[in-house]
Amino acid sequence: MKADLLLRRRIVFGAGRYADLLVWRVPRPVPGSRHVYKYRFAYVVEGVCVLRYDNEAGKGDHRHLGALESPYVFTTPEQLVEDFLDAIGRWNDEHGHF
């Protein structure tokens, strides 16, 4: 079985601000993860990725806020989208973007 693309979406938040969301169902878990999803979410502001959630092989589920990296507890793709959009909202509030 090959990877199946489940979600590919770009959300534009304003001039120079967008999010790219990608989720695939894979035949077996990515090393470091316990589920059958591979994902990469990025929030980009004026050409700089300021927020990223992904499950890079060997690292498992984690998120980046600027240069800081921390674990992320994955439950479902739907919850992942909700958590990421909430994180974007918090980032925008903290940085004066509406």
Image (cartoon, grey):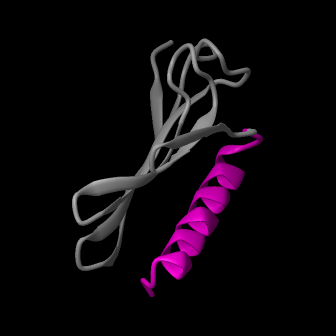
Q: Residue at x 46, y 22 (%)?
A: 3
The reply, left or right, for residue 35 in relation to residue 56 is right
* Residue extending farthest front: 67
**93 and 53: which one is in front?**
93
Q: Position of residue 87 (x, y in %)?
A: 60, 63
The reply, left or right, for residue 19 in relation to residue 82 is left
The number of numbered badges drawn on the structure is: 0
Membership of 30 in magenta stretch: no
Q: Residue at x 22, y 58 (%)?
A: 47
Q: Position of residue 19 (x, y in %)?
A: 39, 60
Q: Position of residue 35 (x, y in %)?
A: 70, 25
Residue segment shown in magenta:
74-98
Q: Is residue 74 visible?
A: yes
**1 and 65: which one is in front?**
65
Within the image, what quadrant is residue 76 found in?
top right
Image quadrant in which the C terminus is located: bottom left
The reply, left or right, for residue 97 in relation to residue 44 is right
Q: Residue at x 65, y 61 (%)?
A: 82
Q: Is residue 22 visible?
A: no
Q: Residue at x 23, y 66 (%)?
A: 46
**35 and 63: which one is in front?**
63
Q: Is residue 92 above or below residue 33?
A: below
Q: Is residue 3 above or below residue 71?
A: above
The majority secondary structure of the magenta stretch comes to: helix
Q: Position of residue 9 (x, y in %)?
A: 39, 56
Q: Is residue 67 above or below residue 55?
A: below
Within the image, what quadrant is residue 93 found in?
bottom right
